[in-house]
Image (spheres, rainbow, N blue to C red):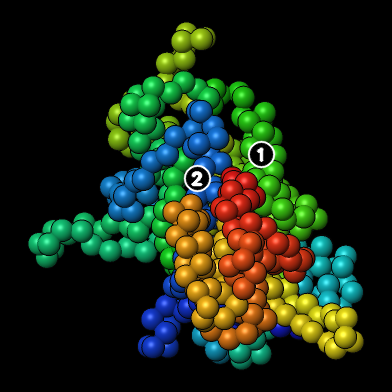
Amino acid sequence: MSLQQENRFQTIISHAKEYGFVFPSSEIYDGLSAVYDYGPYGSELKKNIRDYWWKSMTQMHENIVGIDAAIFMHPTTWKASGHVDNFSDPMIDNKDSKKRYRVDHLLEAHADKLREKGAEKEADDLLQTMDALLAKEDFPSLKKLIEDNKIVCNVSETNNWTDIRQFNLMFSTQIGSVAGEADTIYLRPETAQGIFVNFLNVQKTARLKIPFGIAQIGKAFRNEIVARQFIFRMREFEQMEMQFFIRPGTQKEWYEYWKEARLKWHLSLGIPQEKYRYHNHTKLAHYADAALDIEYEFPIGFKEVEGIHSRTDFDLSSHQKYSGKKLTYFDNEINQHYIPYVIETSIGLDRMFLLILSYAYNEEKWTKEDGKEDSRVVMRIPEKIAPIKLAVLPLVKKDGLPEVARDIIADCAPYFKCFYEEKDTIGKRYRRQDAIGTPFCVTVDHQTKEDGTVTIRHRDSMKQERINKTEIKDKLLNLLLF
Ligand code: GAP
């Protein structure tokens, strides 16, 4: 990461804290690594992203329904899903600092440094070799690759490395109150398995025919080792996943369909296409026959925000085997019983939140008509998901203006989130709303009392127009509809 990128990332993190978007968890005790809390504006923004995804899946598709499964699941679930045996990352420890690294992250960071020095080809070759060795799980050669490239620990600055070992990322705990009889269970590392084990319950009760999807939003937990990237990589996070059940043999076309549909969803928020790219996986997870990431250009570089996975019939077949319960579907169009294939779309809610913060944060400077310099920090959060949609600001605290402002809020608050403020100059109040991304500010002044008009100011253009106060609600509802 260049110094400029690092600075931008740190500025966004500070802004998120200062303006009530994201706080370190239990901060008064110095925080908990890779765990974060969402503040007043953060929780609104997060909810709006969640709703935007949920609506696009369940309301805009007749054949996709939602569920809300428990975080705790029968422990055999994770044996069947492969997570007990395979959900691990190759790690390496530095013997001097005792610091542990994920092998791919260590090599990727080195490739970034090579790129900064202009050695693009060397960086590409390094990552290609890494991918090939990871795919073969050839740990001795990966260690040699680290040593040959003279990669050092950034704490001890030595290359005194242990052998590479696998570490399971699932958190475990005990269920049951009788000591000695308690069973080990896991905090789910993905929400997908709650969908698979409910596949027939949902298909039957919602009377669904293939192809159909089941969507779910919920918490997932991973004991991430490299956890210094704010809400990019967390130990407790939220996923928005959809499993799309299809006829075997149709997986290629549905994979292409969801690859495009999901990118369109991102672009529908008004984020430019050039900020995104696809990254095809060369090392496939144990359940997949094809997989790609939708990557976004975060301040820390192009990184995964969402995964599209062709999961074959791996999960349902495995649950059928471990549970002894039949999980086949009868397709009456072709008169056949089969275990459906699955295309999965999986996006991290917190990572999407970081994407929005990264896209939205802008520092602007300009020269005013009187020749003086002016500046602002503005969060260009897509209007539909902005935490506050409308701020209503009486010009002064007297002459009946606050009462008119309160009436406007009473009219609009049942439809979208409003904010009232009467302290400080209008200019200062506009800046505060810019900093939290409020797309519209309405100012009530003395003219409002005469002719019922108000000034509406648009966050992005800073343009102002006068409209009748009775038009505000419908104007915003039209702009905010999703
Ligand atoms: N069910 C498939 C699955 O979980 P994944 O690629 O491991 O696939 C999907 O995760 C998405 O979940 C990622 O694209 C990312 O947005 C999010 N995610 C994964 N691990 C995360 C973490 N530690 N912190 C925040 N988000 C994470």
Q: Is residue 63 above or below residue 79?
A: above
In the current view of this chain or complex, which residue is farthest to the left?
Answer: 178
Q: Which of 214 and 480 is in front in this view?
A: 480
The residue that mark 2 highlights is 54
The residue that mark 1 highlights is 261
Instruction: Give the residue displayed 51% in from the left and 28% down from the top.
Output: 62
- For marks 2 and 1, give the CA distance: 14 Å
x, y percent for residue 398: 51, 81
For mark 1, give the secondary structure.
Answer: helix
x, y percent for residue 235: 45, 68
Q: Nearer the viewer, residue 376 or 323?
A: 376
The amino acid marked with disc number 1 is Ala
Crowdedness near tag 1: few (<14), some (14–19) or many (≥20) residues, C-alpha within 10 Å: few
Q: Which of 209 and 424 is in front in this view?
A: 424
Question: Closer to the observer: label 2 or label 1?
Answer: 2
Q: Which of 74 and 354 is in front in this view?
A: 354
The amino acid marked with disc number 2 is Trp
- Quadrant housing the N terminus: bottom right
Q: Is mark 2 within 8 Å of ligand 1?
A: no
- Quadrant housing the C terminus: top right
Earlier in the chain: of badge 2 and badge 1, it is 2
